[in-house]
Every structure is written in structure tokens, then in C-alpha cells.
Image: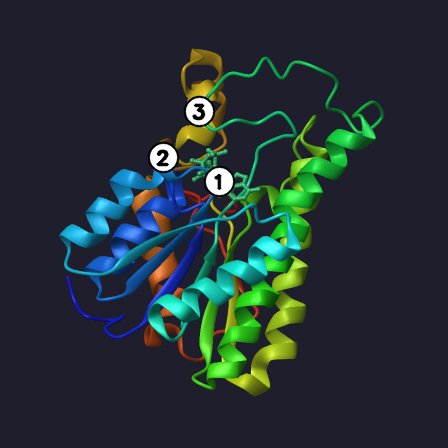
Amino acid sequence: MADRLAGKVAVITGGASGIGAACARRFADEGADIVIADLDAARAADTIAAVEASGRRARFVRTDTSVEADNEALAAATVEAFGRVDCLVAAAGIANADYVSGQDTGATGPRDILRVPVADWERVMAVNLTGVMLTDRAIAAAMIAAGNGGAIVNIASSAAAIPLRGGGDYCVSKAGVWMLTKVLALELVGHDIRVNAIGPGFIETPMTEVMRSDPAGETLMKRMTPMRRLGRAEEIASTALFLVSEDSSYLTGQLLFPNGGMFTG
Ligand code: NAP
């Protein structure tokens, strides 16, 4: 590995699992110290150990990203621990209101827009959209105060651009992240903070575990993907690394789609 993030400090929400965890490991390999912001410290232990094994410092900050005060405390704890913050990956997210990562929670209730309970809709928005906004602005404020610029990467989804029947709450929340990214990129450009987003296709993480364990679900995901395979979390981490590194120094307000070619036809 290279040292593309040497001397940098990266905050990663949802960093205990899946895409966020892969980002934490990859960024540490590239020289960054890492703050993992997630709900459950125990689930972050392996990732914290991996970061430390690569010679970098790691902290866990218990954060519910849908709670404004938690995001502000996260920014303060990061600056207190490491003196600065340079990169953010906002990866915390849920697939639906009942989502618990990797578990089949029996989410068989009505999900289409005509029948989805308002409370479920609002829960998905609170985590996937408002939560990303709250993390972005708390960390951006710390970046502005430090005066070193920075790079923010929001994890949206290819579902920001593809309507999924029964997934209206998720699709709309991710489309919101896409526009949030563009507005924030404009608002922060004068502070030398770049803001971009990633719209993964189907990725092998706990979020797709239930669907992958069902042959019909596996077939559907592969049929929607011209490469005929799911992506790996490490492939999304590579895209995130590009977006936080100097390799993308002229890129802001963009959504990149590592999705195995979903939008080719
Ligand atoms: P994952 O393995 O389930 O990881 C999501 C992480 O976010 C978990 O550690 C989860 O904690 C945490 N989290 C959930 N709600 C949170 C909250 N309110 N505050 C703080 N942390 C919270 O799923 P993933 O696939 O890596 O998903 C990461 C992001 O990629 C999500 O935004 C997802 O929508 C997006 N994405 C995933 C795919 C895919 O195919 N996997 C495709 C497109 C986009 P707990 O486990 O403790 O609940």
C-alpha cells in the first residue's frame, strides 16, 4: 500500500461493519488515523484491531448518526483525540425501518408507498438522509475551524437512481443524499472541502446477507448487474479512497456508481 493519507485523520460512520469497516482498514493502510462512529463498540473491535495492526491509531465513538448531539460530540471527540479531521465517510445506513445488520427481521410488512407506515418512512429518512446531513455538517464545522480543508464522502446507493418497488423510503433517502452532496459541495467549496458521494450496486455486506441467502434474491441481484457478480466492500473502499485522496483533487459534487455496470443499458 501507499501513503496517500499519511498524517490525515478520517471519521467513518457505520465503520463497525461492511463498507464502513472496509474503508477504515483501507484508509489505515494508506496512513490515516481512524475514528469509527457506530452504535455498538463490540462490533467495531475487529476493525479497531486491524487499524492498530497496520500501525495507525483508532478510536471508537458511540454515535447514533440520527441524533444531532451525537454528531457534535463525535466531531469534538475526534478533534480532542487527534487534533484535526481531514476526511469523512458517512456510511451509516439502514435498508428499511426494521433493519438490523445481517439479520432477517421478518420485514414482510407493507413497503409500497401507498401503505408504508409513516413512522417507518420517517425512520429511514432520519438515519439515511437527516443523519448524513447531521454528520456532514458537524464534521464540516470542525474542518472549517481547523482551516485545513477536507474531503467528505457520503455513501448513497445506486437506488438513488433506480426506483425499487417496495423500497420507496430507501430510494428517496438515497436520492436525497445525492442532492445533499451537490448542495453541500457548493456551500463548502470556499473552505477547500470537497463533497462527493458513492452509489454502490449490490455489495457483499451484512446488508445483502438475507437476500444473498435466498437463491431467488441472489439471482435477481446478479440479473440486475451486467458483471453478473456482487461487489466487494473493498471495491467501494477503493472508490472512497480515491474520493478522499489528492487523486480526485478537482472533483466535487459528484456521485460515482461502482455497480458492475448497472447503468450501461
Ligand atoms: P452494514 O454492514 O449493515 O453496515 C451499516 C452500519 O451502519 C452498521 O454497523 C450499523 O450498525 C450502522 N448503523 C446503522 N444505523 C446507524 C445509526 N443510526 N448510527 C450509527 N451507525 C448506524 O451495511 P453496508 O452494506 O456496509 O452499508 C453501508 C452503507 O452503504 C449504507 O448507507 C447502505 O445504505 C449503503 N449501501 C449498501 C449497499 C449494499 O449492497 N450493501 C448498496 C448500496 C448502498 P448496527 O449493525 O449496530 O445496526
Judging by the rendered image, the residue that carries numbered circle 2 is: 43
As helix, strand or loop, the secondary structure at mark 3 comes to loop
Q: Which mark is residue 123?
A: none
Mark 2 within 8 Å of ligand 1, using the beta carbon: yes
Judging by the rendered image, the residue that carries numbered circle 1 is: 39
Identify the image quadrant of the N terminus: bottom left
Mark 1 within 8 Å of ligand 1, using the beta carbon: yes
Point out the tag, 2 or 3, that comes first from the N-terminus. Answer: 2
Q: Which residue type does callout 1 highlight?
A: Leu
Query: Which one is nearer the viewer's eye here, 255 or 146?
Result: 146
Mark 3 within 8 Å of ligand 1, using the beta carbon: yes
Judging by the rendered image, the residue that carries numbered circle 3 is: 102
Whole-number angstrom distance, CA of label 2 to CA of label 3: 12 Å
Badge 3 crowding class, 10 Å Cα cut-off, few under 14, some 14 to 19, many 20 or more, is: some
Whole-number angstrom distance, CA of label 3 to CA of label 1: 15 Å
Q: Is residue 174 above or below residue 4?
A: above
Badge 1 crowding class, 10 Å Cα cut-off, few under 14, some 14 to 19, many 20 or more, is: some
Tell me where residue 47 appears, x and y as whole percent. Answer: 28, 44
As helix, strand or loop, the secondary structure at mark 1 comes to loop
Would you say residue 253 is visible in this rendering? Answer: yes
Q: Which residue type does callout 2 highlight?
A: Arg
Residue in view at x 61 percent, y 64 percent = 181
In this rendering, would 225 be left or right of 191?
A: left
CB under 8 Å between discs 2 and 3? no
Q: Which residue type does callout 3 highlight?
A: Gly
CB under 8 Å between discs 2 and 1? yes
